Amino acid sequence: MIHDFLAHLETLLLWGFAGCAFVSASLMLVLRQPMRVAMALVSCMVFLGGVYGLLGVHFIAAFQVLIYVGAVMVFMVYAIMLLDPRDESATAKYSKLLWPGIIGFALLAEALAVGYWNDLPHAPRGALGEPFDIARFSTAFLTEYWLHFELTSVLLLAAVVAALAVIKENRRHERG
Amino acid sequence: MDKVQMLQVLAASLFALGLTGVIIRRNVLVMLMCMELMLNGVNLSLVTFAHTMGSTVGAVLVFLIFVVATAEIAIAIPIVLLLVRRKRSLDIESYTDLKG
């Protein structure tokens, strides 16, 4: 009885989190202020973290909240706070591409949804619901995917060098 | 409609919403945030497939996407700061110097 109720609650929560994520993602397109858009994106990411948690991938849920909301979005909010008062151009919210964009959205969403509806590969049912734990993930990460790991560190190094180059360019521009 | 289908449709619609936001919005920061939304849609799709198939490949890819998103923001925000310092505007239509 109570087991049944818990299973239903899990499905209900999954649908609720998914619906809330979709609503906050749609709000991002209609809100005018950048700060409100950022808050909508933060809530979308937190709801997606809830979805990951319900799927049993707890470490990705934790990293979703820690890295995306905690680092990326805080950086974004700082940038908005730094830049927003100077922006006098907020008269028009949408660009000239509004109608082509909406038509493209409708076509893309329809194509993707129909594609998923018809030919989603049916998974081996035995594996479903078996949550992969962090031990298995870390072993795979450092034995099978070590090359990708190293390439990622090279990418991060390149990002640091590029950020320094951008700052240097800025100083040169200010001097000359 | 089962769980996996619903999550895949959600992932597809998040990606489509993000792409539409990049196309129709004018504020550069909002466009950057819509790009993050696209990455989130891809992440959701990868996690759902990894969960369905019971493999770790999807989770590894999600981690790599986290790193790429962080690096992208770390480069994009200084570039936006520089552009705003030169043009005094966040509007994408004022950056038309390369237009013929």
Image (tube, grey):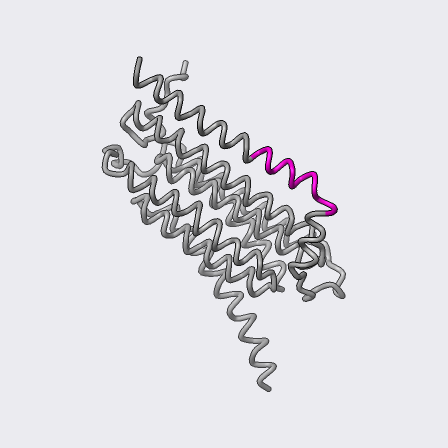
Question: Is A170 situated above or below B41?
Answer: above
Region of the chain picked out in magenta, as a range: A143-155
Image coords of residue A149 (percent x, y): 65, 41
Main structural element of the magenta stretch: helix, strand or loop?
Answer: helix
Residue plotted at (41% across, 50% down): A41
Q: Nearer the viewer, residue B12 or B59?
A: B59
Q: Nearer the viewer, residue A166 or B14?
A: A166
Tell me the quarter of the image containing the N terminus of chain B.
bottom right
Image coords of residue B6 (percent x, y): 58, 59
Left or right, B1 with respect to A166, comes to right
Residue plotted at (55% across, 42% down): B67
Residue plotted at (30% across, 44% down): A32
Image coords of residue A78 (percent x, y): 33, 43
Question: Is B80 situated above or below A120?
Answer: above
Queried whether the magenta region covers residue A61, the answer comes back as: no
Left or right, B86 with respect to A67, comes to left
Residue at the outermost bottom position: A1
Tell me the quarter of the image containing the C terminus of chain B.
top left
Left or right, A97 with respect to B47, comes to left
Quarter where residue A121 is shown = bottom right
